[in-house]
């Protein structure tokens, strides 16, 4: 049994067929084979998850809990918990639980933060990704936009082409971003819930520290 | 033994045999209050059929009362159902109105007239199948009596009470009246469709005037509310282990909740006038109105999880992973409530968002009905055995349709959006009313499409009939004109210029011709042939693609052309009646239309097909005989073939903008045209030891009962795409439900006695339907959704609805005359 608070769901269609829960020790993705999950499991809902008969796998090094693992065709295919079994595995203990994202510097980004809501400071979109749409909303394909730390380091905002903010342009300013930490193999990524997680209203970085901002 | 003595014995023997027949008629009279000589003639089974409707007795009674579990409609024609009451056809060419439901359970208020007597035009049988009923509310058909009856059943209702008052003919004032009141109730959860509550009454009055005139009126009103059962896939029935599994209900606040319901409140009033000129002529004039509201309730949802427990993605078969499949199987078996809807959970979802916007609602589709009718019929007896009838029938129907929120299921409001529209980023596409965008709808307020359909109809017909000793000949003609129009009252975002306001008027003239010849070999043996050709105007559901959204018409609207021939032989002996009919009918220019989600285009589409021709042909054999004294046997054999005779044209258009995305020819030739059984054998044995007792058993064997096909998956385009002969052959193959028997038993006992010179009768009856509790699928159909992407046939399997199983009815009736 694990318990955690929902920090991410499909409300803005950036996350698909899964919810992300976290507790004080970590976070994890829970694959659910349904849509409009945010209505059942809104952000802030405190859940108890019975993990018996679930599988712990990873997708490109990002850990997740799934209901089924099928290797019959030679590749690993994971399946989410089917809708009728939601209530067998998940119980909502309370709603409207407020989660405060932890502030993390680039050097402290690591696997222990997978699935957790974090806040990174003094970041801005790279020059090439500034003013670009978050994703390709016309062709419904996802995109990664580079966020650079003023003090060095890069993390990628990964957005789905189906997200309701996919067609919005990335801001030009500098500031903080809240998101759920994830990985794609070795690439560090941040999943935002919607554009209210992006707080880039300050002037962009200047000075020696920025000039030394080499790609990581 | 002397010759005279033998003759006396023979006469007494005949009299003894004749008693049960008289007793049956006597019992029938007791039940319906019949008295007049003409009604005796009618009721004495003058069952010569007209046109291509089947023999009235026994095939009609056997199919109607014993074969409905198999949807047995003689000759496989279940469309064009008419409901004639005193010459007025109360059916409408506009949908959302069913006249049969308007007088449900009030059947005792009307006298049923054999619509196939002699050579009746047509409204009584012209081109229409044998499912037309012809009733009258005229009180002269009922003798003086007070009747109180009650019934208990576990079928469509649990208990019923009825009161009937017939004044008989009041000589002094020349008045007569008939009052009938009924109530039926089935408390929640005792019948498969949930519940039923019906209260109704019918009142008829007639007055004899001078110079052989009479006037009368009838008013009837049924208030009906009942639950509805939804079909489901075989897998869900297996999981539930119930033949009566109904996925559309669930639990709400601790009580069973049936969102799918229908209700009706449409009182009907009409007046009749009759004038006779001795034996020369008779004139009937009727005028009537029906004004009221019918509603259909169902759960609706938008942008949320599908709440149906039998949704294909929720069932074990959808999971590719065998472990997950097993988990689901175990879960459903140990949690049967998972196969019903959890309305408390839906309420929680509605209340969980900040503004408490409802995603799940209970919606009422409202039909405001206004029907006006006029009918006139003049019969004239010419010299030299000629008779003629002419008639005029007029109708003006207006039915306004809109939605009303019945229940927000805990939420505060519902957004007035069109949930069927594909969201392509447009800001107004999904608005149902662009003059008031983003409307928040509360309980009792209307939303969605708001439109009215109007039909004006004028029909003129006439027939001539010559009756001679050896033959009868008749010819009839009909001309009819139907005019349709649509008026929209909301301006939606999909078709803002077209949705609002009146549409153009569409006119559909039609005609009919029927010729009949009857030759009497003897007083008992004769042959009859009927030839006919007629066209029928389409119904509004065939004309308009989606009148809730726009006034555009379907692609293939042509008047349906019916042609046919019927050859019949009849033998009518004293104790045995036999008939044999060979029939052939062609229906050309049939069309069909369907809104469904297309998995290849990832959008909702309209599928339309047209210029389809069907053939209905076959042989019917019927026999009634009295043998062994009080035993009567009725038997019917019907061998038919009802099939699609050609490959019709089709189109697929996107629902958003009616853009045509596909068209071509459907490969349907040879497929069954109906889901009615094509071969039926029926036998009924009645034992009547005395006039007051009767036991009967009826068996019906149904064969070649097809499923309902989804035509649009049978295109040549799909055949080329599938690239798998085996799968295509499966799609093309005919699919029949199992051949099955159903047995029904009926018994009745009557006691008669006199109190203060008034005759009283008490009658008890009991019946058991489907005595052997056979698992019978009422119907089965292919879903409109098909896997047009990967062509997996098992992805959207057949849906079924099953018969309830053995049901009983117990009745008691007291009649005071």
Image: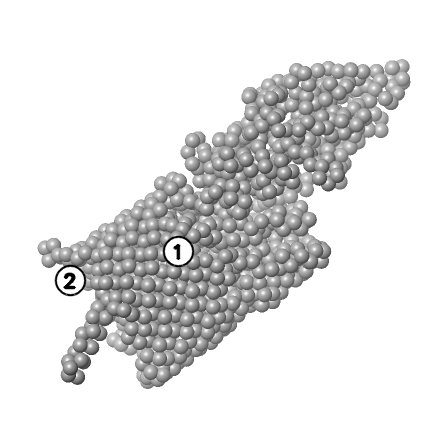
| Quarter of the image that includes the C terminus of chain B | bottom left
**Residue B130 location, x and y as percent?**
42, 65
Residue B100 marker: 1
- Callout 1: SS: helix
| Quarter of the image that includes the N terminus of chain B | bottom left
Q: Is residue B620 above or below residue B235?
A: below
**Residue A1 location, x and y as percent?**
60, 21
Q: Nearer the viewer, residue B160 or B297?
A: B160
Residue visible at 76% across and 34% down in the picture: A142
| Front disc: 2 or 1 | 1
Residue visible at 53% across and 31% down in the picture: B350
Residue A74 marker: none
Residue visible at 56% across and 38% down in the picture: B329
* Sequence-first tag of 2 and 1: 1
From where the camera sits, is residue B561 visible?
Answer: no
Asked if residue B158 lies left or right of residue B428, the reply is left
Furthest residue in direction left, as rendered: B756
Residue visible at 47% across and 52% down in the picture: B777
Asked if residue B631 lies left or right of residue B667, the reply is left
Q: Is residue B603 above or below residue B511?
A: above
The answer to whether marks 2 and 1 sit on the same chain is: yes
**Residue B173 location, x and y as percent?**
17, 61
From where the camera sits, is residue B622 visible?
Answer: yes
Q: Is residue B180 above or below residue B46?
A: above
Q: Where is residue B68, by image quadrant?
A: bottom left
Q: CA distance from mark 2 to mark 1?
A: 36 Å
Residue corresponding to mark 2: B172
Asked if residue A167 lies left or right of residue B92, the reply is right
- Callout 2: SS: loop
Q: Nearer the viewer, residue B435 or A18?
A: A18
């Amino acid at each position: 049994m694990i318990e955690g608070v929902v920090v991410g769901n499909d409300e803005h269609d950036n996350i698909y067929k899964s919810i992300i829960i976290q507790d004080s020790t970590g976070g994890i993705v829970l694959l659910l084979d349904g849509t409009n999950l945010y209505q059942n499991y809104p952000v802030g809902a405190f859940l108890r998850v019975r993990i018996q008969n679930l599988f712990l796998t990873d997708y490109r090094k990002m850990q997740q809990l799934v209901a089924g693992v099928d290797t019959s065709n030679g590749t690993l295919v994971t399946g989410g918990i089917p809708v009728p079994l939601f209530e067998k595995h998940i119980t909502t203990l309370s709603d409207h639980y407020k989660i405060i994202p932890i502030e993390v510097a680039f050097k402290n980004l690591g696997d222990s933060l997978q699935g957790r809501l974090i806040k990174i400071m003094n970041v801005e979109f790279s020059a090439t990704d500034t003013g670009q749409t978050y994703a390709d909303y016309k062709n419904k394909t996802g995109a990664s936009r580079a966020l650079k730390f003023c003090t060095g380091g890069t993390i990628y905002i990964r957005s789905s082409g189906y997200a309701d903010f996919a067609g919005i342009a990335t801001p030009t300013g500098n500031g903080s971003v809240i998101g759920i930490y994830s990985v794609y193999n070795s690439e560090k990524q941040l999943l935002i819930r919607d554009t209210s997680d992006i707080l880039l209203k300050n002037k962009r970085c200047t000075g020696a520290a920025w000039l030394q901002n080499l790609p990581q | 033994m002397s010759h005279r003595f033998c003759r006396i014995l023979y006469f007494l023997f005949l009299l003894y045999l004749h008693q049960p027949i008289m007793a049956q008629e006597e019992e029938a009279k007791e039940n319906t209050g019949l008295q007049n000589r003409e009604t005796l003639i009618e009721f004495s089974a003058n069952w010569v059929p007209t046109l291509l409707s089947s023999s009235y007795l026994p095939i009609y009674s056997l199919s109607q009362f014993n074969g409905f579990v198999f949807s047995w409609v003689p000759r496989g024609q279940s469309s064009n159902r008419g409901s004639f009451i005193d010459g007025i056809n109360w059916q409408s060419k506009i949908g959302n109105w069913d006249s049969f439901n308007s007088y449900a359970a009030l059947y005792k208020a009307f006298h049923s007239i054999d619509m196939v007597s002699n050579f009746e035009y047509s409204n009584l049988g012209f081109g229409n199948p044998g499912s037309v009923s012809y009733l009258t509310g005229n009180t002269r058909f009922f003798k003086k009596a007070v009747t109180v009856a009650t019934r208990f059943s576990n079928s469509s209702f649990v208990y019923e009470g009825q009161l009937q008052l017939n004044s008989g003919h009041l000589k002094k004032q020349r008045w007569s009246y008939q009052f009938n009141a009924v109530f039926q109730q089935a408390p929640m959860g005792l019948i498969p469709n949930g519940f039923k509550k019906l209260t109704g009454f019918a009142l008829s009055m007639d007055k004899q005037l001078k110079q052989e005139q009479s006037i009368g009126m009838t008013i009837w009103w049924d208030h009906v509310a009942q639950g509805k059962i939804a079909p489901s896939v075989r897998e869900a029935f297996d999981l539930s282990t119930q033949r009566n599994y109904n996925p559309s209900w669930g639990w709400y606040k601790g009580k069973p909740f049936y969102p799918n319901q229908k209700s009706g409140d449409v009182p009907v009033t009409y007046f009749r006038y009759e004038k006779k000129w001795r034996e020369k002529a008779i004139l009937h004039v009727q005028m009537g109105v029906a004004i009221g509201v019918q509603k259909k309730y169902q759960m609706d949802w938008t942008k949320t999880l599908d709440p149906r427990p039998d949704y294909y993605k929720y069932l074990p078969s959808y999971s590719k992973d065998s472990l997950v499949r097993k988990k689901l199987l175990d879960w459903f078996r140990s949690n049967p409530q998972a196969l019903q809807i959890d309305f408390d959970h839906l309420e929680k979802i509605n209340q969980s968002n900040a503004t408490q916007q409802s995603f799940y609602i209970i919606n009422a589709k409202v039909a405001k009905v206004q029907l006006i009718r006029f009918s006139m019929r003049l019969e004239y007896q010419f010299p030299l055995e000629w008779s003629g009838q002419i008639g005029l029938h007029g109708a003006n129907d207006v039915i306004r349709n809109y939605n009303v929120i019945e229940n927000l299921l805990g939420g505060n409001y519902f957004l007035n959006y069109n949930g069927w529209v594909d969201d392509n980023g447009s800001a107004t596409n999904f608005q149902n009313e662009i003059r008031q965008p983003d409307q928040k709808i509360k309980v009792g307020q209307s939303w969605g499409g708001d439109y009215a359909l109007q039909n004006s109809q004028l029909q003129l017909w006439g027939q001539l009939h010559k009756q001679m000793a050896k033959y009868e000949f008749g010819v009839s003609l009909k001309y009819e004109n139907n005019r349709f129009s649509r008026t929209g009252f909301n301006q939606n975002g999909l078709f803002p210029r077209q949705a609002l306001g009146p549409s153009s008027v569409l006119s559909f003239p039609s005609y009919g011709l029927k010729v009949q010849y009857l030759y009497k070999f003897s007083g008992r043996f004769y042959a009859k042939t009927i030839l006919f050709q007629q066209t029928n105007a389409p119904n509004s559901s065939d004309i308009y693609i989606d009148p809730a959204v726009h006034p555009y018409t379907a692609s293939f609207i042509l008047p349906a052309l019916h042609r046919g021939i019927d050859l019949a032989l009849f033998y009518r002996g004293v104790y045995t009646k036999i008939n044999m009919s060979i029939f052939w009918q062609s229906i050309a220019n049939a069309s069909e239309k369907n809104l469904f989600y297309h998995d290849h285009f990832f959008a909702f589409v309209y599928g339309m097909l047209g210029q389809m021709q069907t053939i209905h042909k076959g042989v019917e054999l019927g026999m009634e005989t009295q043998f062994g004294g009080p035993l009567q046997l009725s038997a019917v054999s019907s061998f038919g073939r009802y099939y699609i005779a050609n490959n019709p044209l089709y189109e697929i258009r996107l629902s958003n903008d009616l853009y045509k995305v596909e068209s071509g020819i459907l490969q349907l030739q040879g497929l069954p045209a109906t889901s009615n059984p094509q071969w039926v054998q029926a036998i009924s044995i009645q034992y009547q030891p005395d006039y007051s007792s009767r036991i009967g058993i009826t068996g019906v064997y149904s064969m070649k009962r097809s499923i309902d096909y989804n035509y649009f998956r049978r295109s040549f385009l799909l055949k080329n795409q599938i690239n798998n002969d085996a799968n295509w052959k499966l799609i093309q193959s005919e699919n029949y439900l199992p051949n099955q028997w159903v047995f029904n038993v009926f018994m009745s006992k009557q006691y008669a006695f006199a109190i203060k010179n008034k005759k009283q009768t008490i009658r008890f009856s009991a019946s058991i339907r489907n005595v052997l509790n056979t698992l019978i699928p009422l119907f089965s159909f292919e879903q409109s959704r098909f896997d047009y992407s990967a062509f997996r046939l098992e992805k959207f399997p057949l849906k079924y609805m099953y018969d309830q199983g053995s049901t009983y009815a117990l009745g008691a009736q007291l009649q005071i005359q």
